Image (cartoon, rainbow, N blue to C red):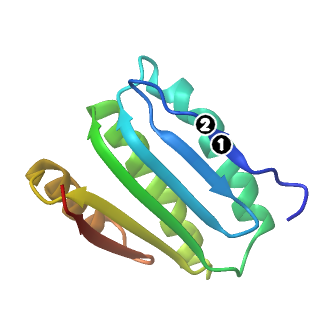
Amino acid sequence: MSSLRHFIVEPTKSSPAIDFNPETHSMSLRGESYPENCARFYEPVFDWLRDYLAASQSEPMVLDMEIIYFNSSSSKAFMDLFDLLDGAAQAGKPVSVRWRYHEENETALECGEEFQEDVQHMAFELVPVAA
């Protein structure tokens, strides 16, 4: 696990802050997500995550997401992310996602509920956040 570096992406107006820490097995995405080229933006995230999952089989992992706004391309990237994590959970890795949404943001809640319905093997918690 020591060969895997801490993965950090600073936020921009259109992309979230990303912090994946292999030592604590914690990951977070926070902010807005509507980068101009979503696939290119998230490609290194998926590369890092695949390496992490290959190196870390049994340690419980938590993904904490608080995305205020995201576009349809980001929604697809998130679903791909959840599919990857759900596959790891199916293979025996304890994985949990905390989908944080602002209480007044019904769209974020509804999207979280849809993501929650699409995963089968990992915990997916909807967490309201006071505005």
Q: Residue 127: image x %, image y %?
A: 27, 70
Check residue 9 in the rendering and tell me which mark sits there, or answer none.
Answer: 2
Q: Residue at x 61, y 82 (%)?
A: 92
Q: From this viewpoint, which residue is outermost toward the right?
A: 3
Q: CA distance from mark 1 to mark 2?
A: 4 Å
What kind of element bears circle 2?
Answer: strand
Residue 123 place in picture, x, y as percent: 40, 78
Label 2 amino acid? Answer: Val
* Image: 30 above or below 10: below
* Residue 43 image-quadrant placement: top right
Number of numbered markers: 2
> Counting other residues with Cα less than 10 Å from the Cα at mark 1, is it few (<14), some (14-19), or many (20 or more)?
some
- Residue furthest front in the image: 131
Say which mark, if any, is on residue 8: 1
* Residue 77, position as x, y percentages in the image: 42, 41
Residue at the image point whose x is 40% and y is 47% from the top: 78
Is 31 left, or right, of 2 in this rendering? left
Question: Residue 18 versus residue 61: which sits nearer the camera?
Answer: 18
Location of residue 68 with respect to 95 vertically, above or below:
above
Q: Determine the residue positioned at 35% across, 36% down.
A: 32
- The amino acid type found where label 1 is placed reads Ile
Is mark 1 in CB contact (under 8 Å) with mark 2? yes
Against 24, residue 33 (above or below) is above
